[in-house]
Image (spheres, rainbow, N blue to C red):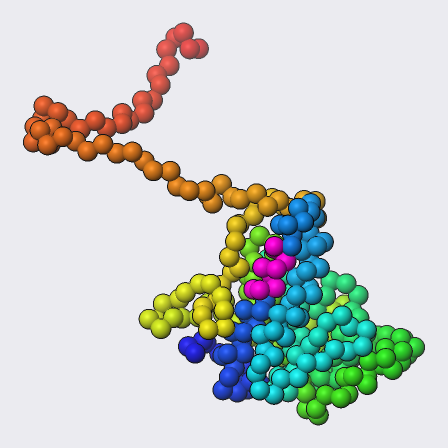
Amino acid sequence: MDYPIGPWARERFGERAAHVCVALVDALNRALANAQDAHRISESTDLLGFGSVQRSRRYACIVEALKEMDGVQVIKPKSSPHEFVVLDGNLIYPFRYAKDSSKPIHRARITERKVSALISELFTFYGPEPEQASLLDELTDDTVGDAAEERMPVLTRLPEGTRLALLAYASNDRSGVLNAWMGEGELGFRGRVHWRRVEELPLTVPDSRGGEGRGHGPTGPLGPVPGPRLTGPTDSAGSTTAPRFDDGVMPAVPLTARAPVERKNSDQFPPATEQAPQKPKANDQDR
């Protein structure tokens, strides 16, 4: 597959790195499409349903995209509503870091909410050796103890050497998936990710003729989720599913060909053209 792969992805996933990355981007697109459909059908005036569907479906779509590959392990930590995929020793954790593409990936946060005990444990057990104080040091001993007692039996069943692979992306309900990144990093204060290594995953893949196609699917080119480009605000004040003004059918402009006799005698039948606009001239009465 002629899909550009960075050194980090190739190091983590080996010869099938291209297929893995294409499948992951496709999974994000499918999850976004499901969320758009749910939002459109619900006719909701806010984006709560859209966000909830996208959040839950991204985990399920990643499982669906990778479950047939050799060496895949699917786990479901206690108290977590989602399943996680471990592939080639990589525990894949997806999260949306922005609603538009203007936010730099190096300012990404793992969540806009309070960091859960499960997330902090994923970084502690499977993230890179921290260069800064662990987030768990900021939590109370009682909180860490209760969370570890509940979740550690599931997490520690993973093979030794399992490492956390972060899948970060930007998206919104109107434009779909805007970008996708993959790498490794530490969990910092208030959910900030301190990247050690991060690589962008292209949303397009060159076709066999050397061009770039659009669409999505593991065996075809990728791109933003197809569907109507929506208008209206993107915040909870009210997004609308009305199509944009340029989504309609282009009108046909009627043209009448000049008769042959007119073309041969253009001096007697000059072609009619629009008159250039005349600049109005002011006079004494206009004062």
Q: Position of residue 104 (x, y in %)?
A: 60, 64
Task: Answer above or below: position of 27 versus 270.
Answer: below
* Quadrant holding the C terminus: top left
Q: Is residue 8 above or below residue 96?
A: below
User: In the image, what residue occupies the spot 23% across and 32% down?
Assistant: 256
Give the vertical position of 154 relative to 81 (above or below). below
Q: Would residue 33 be counted in the magenta stretch?
A: yes
Residue 99 in view of the camera: no
**In the image: residue 112, left or right of residue 249:** right
Q: Is residue 264 left or right of residue 22?
A: left
**Who's the residue at 51% across and 60% down the image?**
224
Q: Position of residue 122 (x, y in %)?
A: 74, 79
Pick whichever, 228 or 42, lies toward us. 42
Residue 14 location (% of width, % of height) = 52, 87
Q: Residue furthest right?
A: 142
Q: Decide if residue 154 is in sight here.
A: yes
Quadrant of the snapshot with the N terminus: bottom left
Q: Residue at x 27, y 27 (%)?
A: 274
Say which quarter of the image contains residue 146: bottom right
List x then y, in percent, for residue 166. Answer: 64, 75
- Magenta stretch: includes residue 78: no
Secondary structure mostly seen in magenta is helix
Residue depicted at 21% across the width and 26% down the height: 272
Residues drawn in magenta: 29-37
The reply, left or right, for residue 217 in relation to residue 194 is left
